[in-house]
Image: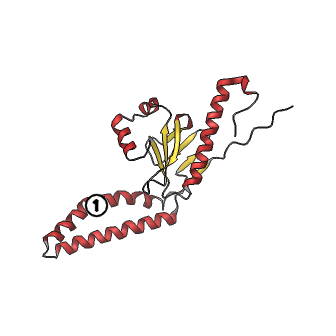
Amino acid sequence: MSAAPPAKSPEPLHLYYSRPLAFLAVGLILTIGLWLVYIFVAGLFSPNIALMIAGGASILFIGPVLAYHAAEPLRAFTRRDPIVTLDAEGITDRRQKGSFLSWDEVGKIWLGYHSQTRSYLIFEYRNAAVATTRGQGHGKAFLRRALTLGDWHVNLRLLACKPADVLHVAKRFQQAAVRREIVKKNGPSSQGWTGSL
């Protein structure tokens, strides 16, 4: 009896920016920014010292935060290439400094638990040696865990996708990588199974 042909491996998944989501994000940031400018101007012309201080402080502290968060939605209007790619080798997020994570390094994958991180695909390394190799010290690791961001994460908020679907594909690729590793270790004892899903 001949062995059944192996199931087809998952197709690579390419994720792009969503322009409608970017437009909404820019609109929200612009609205907040205009409100801060209004408070600042009202504070300058008001005899109320508290309003004047609030206006100045809001521009000084919240303004740079808004500018930082506006950068990615604005980039979404100019970039047409894939931002995130999941394939048989691993996951690539072109927005990050260490942009590639191999499935061999991944121990656990999940979506964020809180409303702020629900659209984050979060990865936990398979072992502590991976964190050391990637230059992640104890302080950074503690901070990421305190913020429930795992060891590495991909922000899916401005991408044209459903986070649950991306999680499903990521887990399939991870399972395929584990099966290939088992076949590689067991050699002929795998009875012709290639490890493909």
Q: Identify which residue is drawn at 65% across, 32% down.
A: 180
Residue drawn 63% across the image and 43% down it: 172
Q: Nearer the viewer, residue 89 or 132?
A: 132
- Relative to 124, say whether 119 is above or below: below
Three-letter residue code for mark 1 = Ile
- Measured as percent of width and height from the top left, residue 34 is found at 31, 71
Report the number of numbered marks.
Answer: 1
Q: Which residue is mark 1?
A: 62
What residue is drawn where x is 45% and y is 29%?
129
Q: Secondary structure at mark 1?
A: helix
- Could you say which quadrant of the image residue 58 lies in? bottom left
| Residue 183 drawn at (x, y percent) | 67, 28
Note whether 84 is above or below 98 in the view shown. Answer: below
Q: Residues within 10 Å of mark 1 (few under 14, many from 20)?
A: some
Residue 38 in picture, x, y percent from top left:
26, 73
Q: Is residue 138 left or right of residue 54?
A: right
Q: Residue at x 66, y 27 (%)?
A: 184
Task: Identify the image quadrant of the N terminus.
Answer: top right
Tell whether 85 sits left or right of 139. Answer: right
User: Where's residue 188, x and y in %?
Assistant: 73, 23
